[in-house]
Image (tube, rainbow, N blue to C red):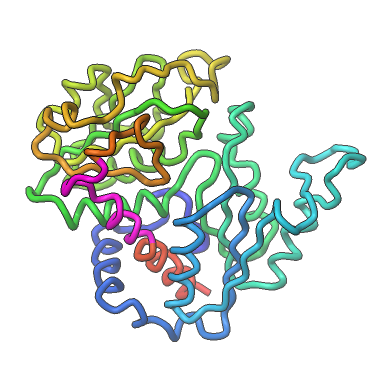
Amino acid sequence: MKSFIHVEDIGDLRQALAEAQEIKNDRYKYQHLGKNKTLMMIFFNNSLRTRLSTQKAAMNLGMNVIVLDVNAGAWKLETERGVIMDGDKSEHLLEAIPVMGCYCDMIGVRSFAGLTDREYDYAETVLNQFIKYSGKPVFAMETATVHPLQAFADLITIEEYKKEKRAKVVLTWAPHCRALPQAVPNSFAQWMNAADDIDLVITHPEGYELDPKFVGNARVEYDQKKAFEGADFIYAKNWSNPGITHAADYGKITSKDMSWTVDTEHMSWTNNAKFMHCLPVRRGLIVTDDVIESPDSIVIPEAANREISCSVVIKRMLESL
């Protein structure tokens, strides 16, 4: 595996889930694979779970780890071609990337959407430059449009907690005070669609439609109560307007409807559903205290599985070196 961005990169999903369980049973089983190998983790944006889980996974596999915060201590990087670099950006990404590749065997990149230019964001401009110019295997630690390590961990968690062979999973939009990217919901929809034992429903206010290439065969339901009925898992997440209906709305907050906040009443519409969220979560906006603190909240086991999903990905990349 030379790159990891979308669900198809992982290959057979059932085999990947079985491998995740194997690693969870013995996290150090494949430590020999990473001996004398180095992972470079490059962060253009803040991180807690991704930073910790990825570093832990790499160490479990015997790797050395270099962490670079681009905005804290490094030269400011220019990402556009054809510009006159007479501002505050001292180095171009096109020189920085191959230099980074000289010092490692594998690269993880975290670079969020700018939410001002949909074409630029959805072209994955930054990530694709790393893939093209680093000369090393590259995996996404959340990009402008996807967060596959999170979605893989979400699927692992659902497999562990589901009570029936086939589960109804609902991805619900919820209000937020800031404009957030669509990366998490995009990947979540993509990975749930790829699973052969999940019925995915996506619910959100009109105008918040995700890109069809991620929605896939999922059912879109604008009535949140109807969407929640009979659900086994509720995955709450805010995202800013994806600009599908009106391009000018891309990246904007076009609804702050607090009736979409997941509370006890919302959860009562479900089939005793488990509550999920990728974290960090804004309490009182996305979800109420009583729901996220309830026995049916599995946000912590979900976060713990980030180490496992990343371990599978890094293991497979090491095997391809």
Towards the viewer: 274 or 63: 274
Helix, strand or loop: magenta stretch: helix
In the displayed structure, does residue 221 sit left or right of residue 8? left
Q: Quarter of the image holding residue 117? A: top right
In the displayed structure, does residue 96 sit left or right of residue 153? right
Residue at the image position 49 percent from the left and 55 percent from the top:
48
In the displayed structure, does residue 21 sit left or right of residue 79? left
Q: Quarter of the image holding residue 262? A: top left
Counting from the top left corner in percent of width and height, residue 113 is at 58, 37
273 vs 20: above or below:
above
Does the magenta segment cover residue 296? yes
109 vs 269: above or below:
below
Residue at the image position 34 percent from the left and 28 percent from the top:
173
Q: Which residues are magenta?
A: 292-306
Residue at the image position 46 percent from the left and 81 percent from the top:
33
Q: Quarter of the image holding residue 12? A: bottom left
